[in-house]
Structure formats: structure tokens, C-alpha cells
């Protein structure tokens, strides 16, 4: 089976990470896994961009980190959404929907 | 926001733990990846390999993650600082010289800036400062430029001036404080009641004057100066409301001014209302008031001056016989009180900046030499991908670090400098210098020093940094040991230019200092007209109420002086109402009988002094012609005066002056016969001008307030108790004030010029030292660079003297160029010293030539040492150098 992988549009990684964290705190590896699963293997997040993104979001104050135990009791760094992060997610979701809506309008028009 | 700050702080200060966390986080990810691969059925090795491959470069991910921390700049700065500190430590001698040079430059500037800050930038700080003016009268034909004001004029201004909200008079008055403790004389500033309100200042305790408290018949009140309250009343917090006795009259203390309030810098200890008597309104003839005025809001100095001009015109028409061409004008208060500072401070600032510039060129030269040896290091870093901007930043960080260390040391030195400066002017002189009491290392001064240090670092760091940017990676890396090729090109030209600059700047400073030394020697040897050695002076003032008549005063001082004269150790005793060189004088108009009257608008003034017969012998002023006063020149005798040489020369053409007659004040007054001519006494400013002067006999003009002048056999201060006893025998309630030797009085007058001379001497020595070291360093470097060449020349038969010539010629060329530039600069710049010099012109040829020779010698010596070393070069070793 041939998987169709896509490159991420610029700026969408933030939205994906924030959205993934909406369901609850988790660690970096899990975030990458979930994005892959939910997107049915279309979106692959390279670690090279995941961790800088996580650190950047943390520096922005949209997510916070905390060391905790993973499923098999290993030390892992867990990220969770902050209040401002939630607001940011709402804002980014809205602007994403407007963007895709607009693109769709153009693409569907013949 | 707070979160981000917290994160950045953490990134800065807990870098290690953050790095560890990053490491752990990424490892966890890898392990999860490996686990998943294992679950997919790979073997252990395959799983690990696949995980690593999918992960990409671990270090790149780390680096990217670090970037988002946003502290990269600070981190790099920290790196640069540590690296810079290591570089400085690696080369301690160079660092030490550079730090010392910077410290000298910075300390000179900090010291001078503190005096500029105190006396020029903010000598006064009143809320209404911008609207305050000083009013003067001038009569250019009569030689009066900043004359005091007549009460009649004050009254006209109050009535007519639309631009002035307040017109305030100031007149010092001395009081004798009696009561607890020994009686003592203090000066009070008599001021109009609106004085404090006009300045806009508030008292520390109590209140200031109410309106109308300066009218006749009001209760007597006094506001104390903070220091006076502390010293004389022990800082009594209950002082307000208490009565004190001045001249045996009770005054109520109504307030104490804040510690930093000093105005109008006349040596006063308190403020009392100046009572403007109704009859004073008509007095246009006597000019004795100082006047302060407050502009109405929205009016300007120009408007005020235009209005004062118009009022002056009207007053002249109204009182043609009283007003003798005096024209009123106003200057801004701040300009008036920075007048003297403006003469001295800019010269000192200029000199200090020169010292700093010399220090900068010196350090720049050192850094340039070091940058040359570090060229390989920089080329390598450039090759490895460092940007030029990054390397420039590295170099600038190093030099700023160097400058800051120098600045800190300079601050310590400046502490001493400021101390020396404030002790350089005796307090009896400095209390008249506005702002001088605030001299010190204030915050303003510290901020100035810190900024100056950073600027200095950038300035001397720019030269090597700029040179570095021109480094060609390829060529530098290809170069061998580098000798032989480095002597050429821009690098060396820059170093020579810096040396020329140093020599030129030092020459200007040395010439400035030389002029001051010459001037001061002239002052020391100038004929003062008095012989200050072994003379002691002190003031005695008789209260008006107790000694109302001429007869009583005459008797009192006659007896006192007789008693003093007979004391052991006293050779001569006399008295004068205003001691020469003490900064006090009294002017009067005059007419010479038999000569046409002076034009009203050009009436000259003469200095008047009232003296006892013994005064001239006591102070050492010589008689030129005729006779001195004697005991017969008393109330019954005919009216006589003595005049000085300047008077005789200017108004009597020196012919038959003795026997001529003159009238003082106006043509109606009695005529005085000139009994003799005495020598000139130098004026207060110790400059070439001597004012025409007239002496009156005390017995005919018994003043209440006299300064005793006592010549002793050498033990001047030891006779003071004897004088005190004589005084107490006559009146135990009278104080003896202002006890001072005449030498002290003269020294006080000289002190500003003396201090200025020392400042310039010290700066010039610093400059000379640094220029010598700078020249030496460059020439020594030149010799090292050309060791190979010198070796070849010697191997080919050059003699030591040829080598000596080779090196000296280069040094001489630099020196001559520097001296030429310096002479041009000195010709242009020393003009500003003109007003401060005495007995030498600002372009004194002797100083210019002498100093140039001195500097040439020093520079050549600095070249000669490395040149001699060059002659010792062993050709074999030199040739093997490559």
C-alpha cells in the first residue's frame, strides 16, 4: 500500500500540536504518533521540526511542560495546553477554517 | 509574558539542567521509536538504526530547540566576555598598560565632569529658575559693566516694569550674634520679602517671609541657613519661634532652609528682610543694591531688556542731575551664576578629553599590535564559518570589557581627584563659587563615567576591529610566520597615524600647561603692592547703637591699635575698612578741582579705602611722593587724601599730584588735598589692571567696621590672644572675626588659577607619559617587524650607526609631523586661555619653542631605545627567523 505523505503548510504545525494537546497532556513522541494516526498516516511530523516547535510554543506560553511518568513508568516530558494556549487554538482554528473555506471556494468553482 | 521571561532566565542561569532535560527528552523519543520498531518485528540493532535514521541529526534538533529560547545573543555575549577575559589574562602586561591608560583618561574626565556638573550644568536648581533674572546697571564710558543698582531705580522698576512679576533687592549686612557663647559676627543676606517665593523654594523648618515683612516697623525675623542652624544652634528642632540677639536686638527665628539651599553665594549664614525705607525711593545717586527679578509667565528676557531700556531713558530725563548715564539691563540668573565657571570649566573639559583621546590612541595601538598576532585565529574562525560581524562583536566586547575595568579603576582615581579639587580652593573662596559645595561622585557623574567607559572601549576597539574585517582568509592562512610582510600596508600606516595624533595632542596639552605655569610664576613674582609675609588681619565691627558718634569710634580704634602696637611681637599695627585682595571694595565718583567736570555719562569711579596712619607700614604699601597720614589728620585737621600711582598717572598725568585737590561723590562736597602718592595694590582678579584708588584718613571718617592689619616679627597667629585681650579690655561683648594671615588672603585669591595650573600640569604629565610609551611601543614593534630586514642589511655590511639612523629617521619623521600638527593646534586653541593668563600671551614663543623641544627630546628618547636594540641584532639569528 502506498502512503501519500504530505508536506505541512507553513504554520500549520503549531495548530496541529495545540489541537492534539486539547485532549489532554502528553509527551512529544505521542503527539507525533497521534497526528500520524488521526491524519491516517498522511501527516508525518519530523522530529527535527517537532521539538523546536514544542519549545517555541512553550516559550510563547501557549503550552507548559512538566516531567512525569510515561505509560511504562519512564520519565518523560509532558506538555499541556495553557489558558492562553486554548485561546490561541481557538483563534488558529478559526483562521484555518476561513483559509480552507476560501481555498475550497476557489477550487470548487469551475 | 511572565512565563517567557521566566523561561529565558532559566535558559540563562540553569543552562546545564536545561541541556540535560533536552537530552533526556530526545532520548525518550528515540527509545519510544525503537520500541515501536521492535514491536513491528525488527531486531534490536535494526530497530535502533531505523529510529536514528528517522530522527535525523540529533545535534541539529538540539540546536534548533536552543534557538527558540531567545537568549542566543546573551549567551554569545557571555561567551565573548569569558573569552575576552581569558585573552586579557593571557597577556597581563598589555592588559595592565591598557587598563592603566584607560583609567588615567577616564579619571581625568570624571574629575572634571564632576566639577562641570556642579558648577556649570546645575549650580542652581530653583523651581522658577527659567524665569529668574539678575538686573544690573552699566555705564561703559565709566568702565562699569555689571554695576549695582540704586534704590530709586528699583522703585521705578517696581512701579513701571510690565514684564517683571517681582523685583527683589539683596544687600548683605553683618550682625553680631550675642547671647549664649562668645559674640561672633555673621553675614546676613538682607532680601525683599518675596525672595523665597520668587525662587520657588520651601523651608526645611518653619516658614519663609510673609509679604510686607520687609516694610518699616515690622517685627524682626530671620531665616537660618541649614549649616548655620547645625553648627551654631546644634540643629535644635525647636528653633522656630525662638528669639536670638543680633546686634543686641531680638530677632525671631521663623524658619530653616534645606541643606542644599545656598543663595546668593555671598558667604551669608541667614536671610533677614531688607527694609526698603520710603525715602530710599528717591535715591538715584547711590548704587549699592543687587537685584533679582522674576519674569512674568510668557515673557522673555529680550522683552524685559527692551522695557528696562525704555525705563532707563525716562529716568534719565526725570533725574538728569542724579542719574549719570546708567543703563539698566538683565541677564538670566543661570548665565550670571555660571559666568566664572564658563571661563575655567571648558578649558578643563577640553584638556581632559585630550588626555582620554591620547589614552585611546595608545590602547588602540596596543590592541592593533595584538590583533596582528591574532590574525591567524580570526582567519581560521572565518574559514570555519564565523561571520565578520560575529568577530567584530568579539573584538568590541573585549575592548569594552577592558575599558570598563579601566573605568572602574578610573572612578577610584577620580575619587581622589575630586577630593584634591575641592581642597584646592579654600572654603572662604569656594563659598562664593555657585555649586562648588555639591562637588562629588554623584549618580550623574557615575552614569557619565560608565557611559564614557563604554564609548571609550568602542572607540579604541573600532580600529583593530575595522582592520580585522579586511583580513583576507586565504592570504592570512597561507602566510608563514608572518614576519617581513606585516610591516607594510594599512595596518602600519594606522599605527603611525595614531602615534602622530598622540604627539600632537600631548603638545597642545603641554603648551597649555606651560602657559599656565609661566603665568603662575608671573603671579608669584608680581608686585602685589603689599608685603603679605608676617602680616595677620582680623575684623572688628562696632554695633551702631553702642558707638553712635564719630568720637567714640575714633577713640575705640585709637586705643585698640595702641594696645596692639605695644604687644610683644608686633612691629606695626593699622586698620583699613576693606582689606585689599579680600574681594570687597567701595567705589565713589570724584572731581578734580581745577579740571573741567567729567561728562555726566562718563563719570569715572575710584576705589575708596579708609585707613589709619599705621596701615601702610603694617601692610607694606610704599609711599611714592609726599607724606602718609599722621595723627594730625583728625577731625580738626584739614581734609587730606592719598592717591595711588594709577590715579596719579591716569587723572593727574603724574605732574605735581601732591598738593592738588579733589572732591568725592559730587561737586558740592568739600575738597580734599592730596597729601601723597602711594604704590598700586593689585586688584582682586590678580590681572594687569590696577584700579585708581583714593585713601581717606580714618580719623576723619571713623567707620564702624575695620579690619586690623598687624605686622609681626614672625609669629603671626600667636599674637591673636593678645589682640583678643586688648579687645575684651575695651568691650568684652565684641567679636573678633575673619582672623587670617595676609598670605592666606593672597593664596585664596590665587587658588583658582593655581588649581587650574595643577590640573593642566597633571594632565600634561599624563599626556607626556602616554605619548612616550605609545611612541616607544610603536618603534619597538617596528624594530621587531623589521628584524629580518635589519639582519639582511647587517649581513650585507650595514654598520650599527646605519641601523640606528634607519630606525631614528622613521621616529623623527613621526615626531616632527606630530609636533607640526600640535603647534598648529596649540596656536588655534590656546587663545581660549587668554583671559585666564597673567603676564604671558596665549602664543608665548618661549613656551611654544621650549615645550616643542622637550617633547621632541622625549619622543626621540622613546625611539632611541628600540633603535639601539636594533643595532644589537645578530644577523645569524635574524636570518634564521623565517
Image: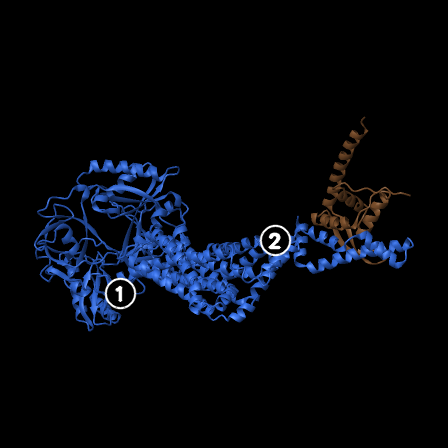
* Disc 1 target residue: B743
Left or right placement of residue A44 versus residue B829 in this view: right
Query: Which residue: 32% across, 64% down?
Result: B180
Chain whose colour in the figure is blue: B
Q: Which chain is brown?
A: A
Q: For residue B710, which numbered disc appears in the image?
A: none
| Residue B850 x %, y % | 32, 61
- In front here: B598 or B830? B830
Q: Which badge, 1 or 2, comes first in the chain's sequence?
A: 2
Q: Is residue B171 left or right of residue A17?
A: left
Q: Is residue B5 visible?
A: yes
Give the image location of residue B319, x and y in percent: 19, 38
In terms of image quadrants, where is residue B511?
A: bottom left
Residue bearing mark 2: B390
Residue B342: where, in percent of width, then height?
Answer: 35, 51
Q: The residue marked by circle 1 belongs to what chain?
A: B
Estimate how packed mark 2 is, as few (under 14), some (14 to 19) or many (20 or more) residues with alpha carbons within 10 Å. some
Q: Give A86 or B230, whichever is nearer the viewer.
A: A86
**Relative depth, front residue between B845 and B348:** B845
Q: Is residue A38 above or below residue B56?
A: above
- Which one is closest to the eye, mark 1 or mark 2? 2
Amino acid at each position: 500500500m502506498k502512503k501519500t505523505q504530505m508536506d505541512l503548510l507553513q504554520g500549520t504545525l503549531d495548530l496541529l500540536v495545540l489541537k492534539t494537546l486539547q485532549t489532554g497532556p502528553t509527551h512529544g513522541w505521542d503527539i507525533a504518533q497521534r497526528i500520524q494516526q488521526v491524519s491516517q498516516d498522511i501527516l508525518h511530523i519530523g522530529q527535527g521540526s517537532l521539538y523546536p516547535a514544542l519549545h517555541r510554543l512553550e516559550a510563547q506560553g501557549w503550552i507548559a511542560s512538566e516531567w512525569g511518568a510515561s505509560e511504562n513508568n519512564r520519565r518523560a516530558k509532558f506538555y499541556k495546553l495553557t489558558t492562553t494556549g486554548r485561546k490561541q487554538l481557538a483563534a488558529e482554528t478559526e483562521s484555518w477554517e476561513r483559509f480552507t473555506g476560501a481555498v475550497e471556494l476557489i477550487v470548487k468553482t469551475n | 509574558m511572565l512565563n517567557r521571561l521566566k523561561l529565558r532566565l532559566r535558559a540563562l542561569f540553569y543552562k546545564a539542567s536545561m541541556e540535560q532535560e533536552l537530552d533526556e527528552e530526545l532520548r525518550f523519543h528515540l527509545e519510544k521509536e525503537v520500541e515501536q520498531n521492535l514491536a513491528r518485528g525488527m531486531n534490536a540493532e535494526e530497530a535502533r538504526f531505523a529510529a536514528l535514521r528517522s530522527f535525523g541529526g540529533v545535534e541539529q534538533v538540539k540546536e534548533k530547540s536552543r534557538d527558540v529560547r531567545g537568549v542566543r545573543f546573551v549567551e554569545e555575549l557571555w561567551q565573548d566576555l569569558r573569552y575576552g577575559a581569558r585573552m586579557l589574562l593571557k597577556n597581563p602586561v598589555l592588559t595592565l598598560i591598557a587598563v592603566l591608560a584607560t583609567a588615567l583618561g577616564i579619571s581625568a574626565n570624571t574629575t572634571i565632569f564632576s566639577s562641570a556638573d556642579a558648577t556649570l550644568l546645575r549650580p542652581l536648581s530653583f523651581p522658577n529658575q527659567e524665569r529668574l533674572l539678575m538686573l544690573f546697571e552699566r555705564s561703559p564710558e565709566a568702565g562699569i559693566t555689571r554695576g549695582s543698582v540704586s534704590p530709586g531705580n528699583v522703585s521705578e522698576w517696581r512701579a513701571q516694569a510690565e514684564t517683571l512679576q517681582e523685583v527683589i533687592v539683596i544687600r548683605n549686612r553683618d550682625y553680631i550674634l550675642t547671647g549664649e557663647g562668645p559674640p561672633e559676627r555673621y553675614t546676613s543676606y538682607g532680601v525683599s520679602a518675596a525672595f523665597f517665593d520668587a525662587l520657588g523654594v520651601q523651608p526645611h523648618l518653619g516658614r519663609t517671609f510673609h509679604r510686607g515683612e520687609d516694610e518699616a516697623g515690622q517685627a524682626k525675623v530671620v531665616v537660618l541657613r541649614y549649616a548655620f542652624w547645625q553648627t551654631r544652634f546644634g540643629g535644635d528642632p525647636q528653633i522656630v519661634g525662638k528669639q536670638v540677639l543680633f546686634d543686641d536686638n531680638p530677632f525671631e527665628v521663623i524658619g530653616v532652609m534645606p541643606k542644599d539651599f545656598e543663595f546668593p553665594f555671598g558667604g551669608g549664614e541667614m536671610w533677614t528682610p531688607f527694609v526698603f525705607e520710603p525715602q530710599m525711593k528717591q535715591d538715584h545717586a547711590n548704587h549699592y543694591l543687587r537685584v533679582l527679578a522674576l519674569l512674568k509667565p510668557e515673557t522673555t528676557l529680550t522683552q524685559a531688556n527692551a522695557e528696562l531700556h525704555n525705563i532707563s531713558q525716562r529716568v534719565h530725563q526725570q533725574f538728569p542731575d542724579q542719574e549719570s548715564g546708567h543703563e539698566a539691563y538683565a541677564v538670566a540668573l543661570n548665565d550670571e551664576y555660571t559666568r566664572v565657571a564658563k571661563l575655567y570649566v571648558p578649558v578643563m573639559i577640553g584638556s581632559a578629553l585630550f588626555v582620554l583621546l591620547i589614552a585611546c590612541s595608545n590602547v588602540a595601538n596596543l590592541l592593533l599590535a595584538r590583533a596582528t598576532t591574532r590574525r591567524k585565529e580570526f582567519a581560521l574562525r572565518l574559514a570555519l564559518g564565523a561571520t565578520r560581524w560575529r568577530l567584530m562583536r568579539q573584538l568590541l566586547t573585549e575592548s569594552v570589557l577592558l575599558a570598563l575595568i579601566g573605568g572602574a579603576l578610573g572612578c577610584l582615581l577620580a575619587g581622589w581627584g575630586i577630593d584634591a579639587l575641592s581642597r584646592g580652593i579654600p572654603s572662604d573662596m569656594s563659598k562664593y563659587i555657585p555649586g562648588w559645595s555639591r562637588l562629588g561622585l554623584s549618580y550623574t557623574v557615575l552614569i557619565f563615567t560608565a557611559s564614557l567607559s563604554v564609548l571609550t572601549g568602542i572607540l579604541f576597539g573600532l580600529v583593530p576591529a575595522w582592520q580585522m574585517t579586511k583580513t583576507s582568509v586565504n592570504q592570512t592562512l597561507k602566510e608563514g610566520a608572518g614576519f617581513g610582510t606585516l610591516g607594510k600596508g594599512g595596518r602600519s600606516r594606522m599605527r603611525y597615524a595614531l602615534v602622530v595624533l598622540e604627539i600632537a595632542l600631548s603638545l597642545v596639552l603641554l603648551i597649555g600647561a606651560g602657559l599656565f605655569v609661566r603665568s603662575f610664576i608671573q603671579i608669584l613674582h608680581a608686585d602685589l603692592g603689599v608685603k603679605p609675609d608676617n602680616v595677620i588681619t582680623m575684623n572688628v565691627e562696632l554695633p551702631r547703637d553702642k558707638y553712635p558718634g564719630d568720637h567714640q569710634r575714633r577713640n575705640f580704634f585709637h586705643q585698640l591699635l595702641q594696645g596692639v602696637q605695644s604687644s610683644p611681637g608686633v612691629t606695626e599695627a593699622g586698620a583699613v575698612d576693606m582689606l585689599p585682595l579680600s574681594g570687597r571694595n567701595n567705589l565713589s565718583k570724584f572731581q578734580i578741582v581745577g579740571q573741567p567736570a567729567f561728562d555726566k555719562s562718563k563719570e569715572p569711579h575710584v576705589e575708596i579705602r579708609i585707613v589709619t596712619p599705621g596701615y601702610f607700614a603694617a601692610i607694606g604699601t610704599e609711599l611714592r611722593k609726599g607724606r602718609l597720614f599722621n595723627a594730625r589728620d583728625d577731625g580738626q585737621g584739614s581734609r587730606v587724601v592719598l592717591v595711588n600711582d594709577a590715579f596719579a598717572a591716569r587723572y593727574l598725568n603724574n605732574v605735581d599730584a601732591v598738593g592738588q585737590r579733589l572732591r568725592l561723590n559730587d561737586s558740592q562736597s568739600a575738597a580734599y588735598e592730596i597729601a601723597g602718592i602711594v604704590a598700586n595694590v593689585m586688584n582682586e582678579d590678580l590681572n594687569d589692571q590696577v584700579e585708581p584708588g583714593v585713601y581717606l584718613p580714618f580719623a576723619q571718617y571713623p567707620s564702624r567696621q575695620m579690619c586690623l592689619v598687624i605686622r609681626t616679627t614672625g609669629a603671626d597667629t600667636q599674637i591673636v590672644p593678645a589682640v583678643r585681650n586688648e579687645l575684651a579690655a575695651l568691650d568684652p561683648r565684641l567679636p573678633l572675626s575673619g582672623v587670617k594671615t595676609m598670605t592666606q588672603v593672597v593664596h585664596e585669591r590665587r587658588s583658582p588659577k593655581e588649581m587650574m595650573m595643577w590640573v593642566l600640569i597633571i594632565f600634561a604629565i599624563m599626556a607626556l607619559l602616554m605619548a612616550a610609551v605609545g611612541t616607544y611601543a610603536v618603534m619597538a614593534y617596528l624594530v621587531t617587524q623589521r628584524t629580518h630586514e635589519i639582519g639582511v642589511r647587517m649581513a650585507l655590511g650595514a654598520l650599527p650607526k646605519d641601523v640606528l639612523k634607519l630606525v631614528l629617521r622613521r621616529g623623527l619623521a613621526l615626531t616632527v609631523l606630530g609636533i607640526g600638527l600640535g603647534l598648529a593646534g596649540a596656536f588655534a586653541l590656546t587663545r581660549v586661555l587668554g583671559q585666564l593668563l597673567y603676564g604671558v600671551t596665549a602664543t608665548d614663543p618661549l613656551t611654544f619653542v621650549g615645550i616643542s623641544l622637550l617633547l621632541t627630546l622625549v619622543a626621540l628618547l622613546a625611539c632611541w631605545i628600540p633603535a639601539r636594540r636594533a643595532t644589537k641584532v645578530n644577523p645569524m639569528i635574524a636570518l634564521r627567523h623565517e
